[in-house]
Image (spheres, rainbow, N blue to C red):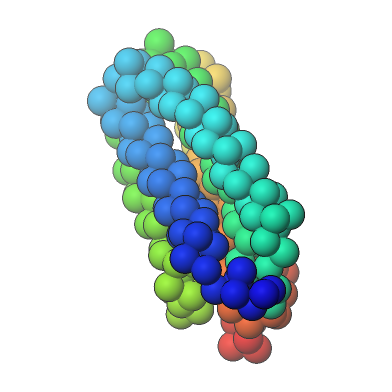
C-alpha cells in the first residue's frame, strides 16, 4: 500500500506542482532584476516602483510553495530522492524570496539615485544583472534536470560577479576621493552592486543544493569541489 501511494498519479502531480512553482518563482525573480536594470539604465522610477510591488507577490508565492512542500512531507511521507527534493525545495524557496527582497532593495536605491546627476555611464552593473539572471535560471534548470554540470557553471559565474563587484567598488572609491560631492551617489551604487553580489551567492547556494539533492554530498563551502560529487 505504501509503495502504491508513492507512485500514484496524484503524488507525481504534487511533485510536479512544486517543480513548476520553483520555476515560476525563479522567473519572477529574473523579471524583477530585468525591471531593475531598466530602472537603472533609463532612470525609470516607475519600473523601480513596479519592482518593489513585485516583491509582495514573490513573498506570497514563497509562503504558498513552502506550505505545499510541508503538506506533502506530512501526508505522503516521501523517502530517499523525493525526500531530498522536497526538503531542498523548501530551502530554495527561501533563497528565491530573499532574492526578491534584495531586488526590491535595489529598486529603493535606484529611486534615490534618480534624484542625483548620473555619476558615470553604467556598464558593469548591467553586466552583473545579466550574469545574475542567468545564474538564477541555470540553478533552477539544474534542479529540474538534475544537471550537476549546470550547477558547476553557476559556481564558476559567482566568481565573475565577485570580481565585478570588487571592480565597481575600486572605481567608485576613486570617484569619491576625487570629488567628495559624489560620495553619497557612489555609496548607493556600491550598495546596488553589493546586493547583486549577494543575489549571486543565493543562486550559487541553490546550485549547491542541487548537487546535494542529486548526490547526497554537501558542497556548500567554497572550498568544496563539485568533482567530489
- Residue 109 in the image: x percent, y percent? 50, 23
From this view, report whether residue 56 is shown above or below residue 198.
Answer: above
Q: Residue at x 57, y 60 (%)?
A: 206
Q: Residue at x 55, y 31 (%)?
A: 60
Number of numbered callouts drawn: 0
* The N terminus: image quadrant: bottom right
From this view, report whether residue 33 is shown above or below residue 160.
Answer: above
Q: Residue at x 52, y 36 (%)?
A: 61
- Depth check: give the residue in front, 196 or 100: 100
From this view, report whether residue 130 is shown above or below residue 122.
Answer: below
Q: Residue at x 44, y 27 (%)?
A: 54
* The C terminus: image quadrant: bottom right
- Residue 105 in the image: x percent, y percent? 54, 28
Q: Residue furthest left?
A: 42
- Residue 116 in the image: x percent, y percent? 41, 14
Is 215 left or right of 152, judged from the image as shown?
right
Examine the rendering and report whether any part of residue 218 can be seen.
yes
* Res. 204 image quadrant: bottom right
Q: Residue furthest front?
A: 1
Examine the rendering and report whether any part of residue 161 can be seen.
no
- Residue 93 in the image: x percent, y percent? 59, 48
Q: Residue furthest bottom?
A: 228
- Depth check: give the residue in front, 165 or 142: 142
- Depth check: give the residue in front, 73 or 55: 73
- Depth check: give the residue in front, 178 or 101: 101
Is 91 left or right of 151, judged from the image as shown?
right
From this view, report whether residue 181 is shown above or below residue 159.
Answer: above
Amino acid at each position: 500500500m505504501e509503495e502504491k501511494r508513492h507512485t500514484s498519479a496524484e503524488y507525481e502531480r504534487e511533485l510536479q506542482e512544486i517543480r513548476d512553482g520553483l520555476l515560476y518563482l525563479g522567473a519572477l525573480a529574473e523579471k524583477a532584476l530585468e525591471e531593475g536594470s531598466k530602472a537603472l539604465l533609463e532612470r525609470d522610477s516607475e519600473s523601480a516602483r513596479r519592482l518593489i510591488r513585485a516583491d509582495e507577490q514573490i513573498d506570497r508565492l514563497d509562503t504558498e510553495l513552502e506550505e505545499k512542500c510541508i503538506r506533502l512531507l506530512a501526508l505522503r511521507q516521501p523517502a530517499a530522492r523525493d525526500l531530498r527534493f522536497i526538503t531542498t525545495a523548501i530551502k530554495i524557496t527561501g533563497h528565491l524570496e530573499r532574492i526578491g527582497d534584495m531586488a526590491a532593495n535595489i529598486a529603493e536605491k535606484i529611486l534615490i539615485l534618480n534624484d542625483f546627476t548620473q555619476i558615470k555611464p553604467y556598464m558593469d552593473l548591467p553586466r552583473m544583472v545579466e550574469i545574475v539572471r542567468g545564474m538564477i535560471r541555470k540553478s533552477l534548470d539544474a534542479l529540474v534536470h538534475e544537471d550537476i554540470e549546470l550547477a558547476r557553471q553557476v559556481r564558476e559565474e559567482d566568481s565573475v560577479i565577485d570580481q565585478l563587484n570588487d571592480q565597481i567598488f575600486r572605481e567608485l572609491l576613486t570617484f569619491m576621493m576625487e570629488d567628495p560631492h559624489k560620495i553619497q551617489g557612489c555609496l548607493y551604487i556600491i550598495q546596488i552592486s553589493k546586493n547583486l553580489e549577494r543575489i549571486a551567492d543565493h543562486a550559487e547556494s541553490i546550485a549547491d543544493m542541487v548537487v546535494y539533492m542529486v548526490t547526497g554530498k554537501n558542497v556548500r563551502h567554497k572550498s568544496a569541489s563539485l568533482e567530489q560529487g
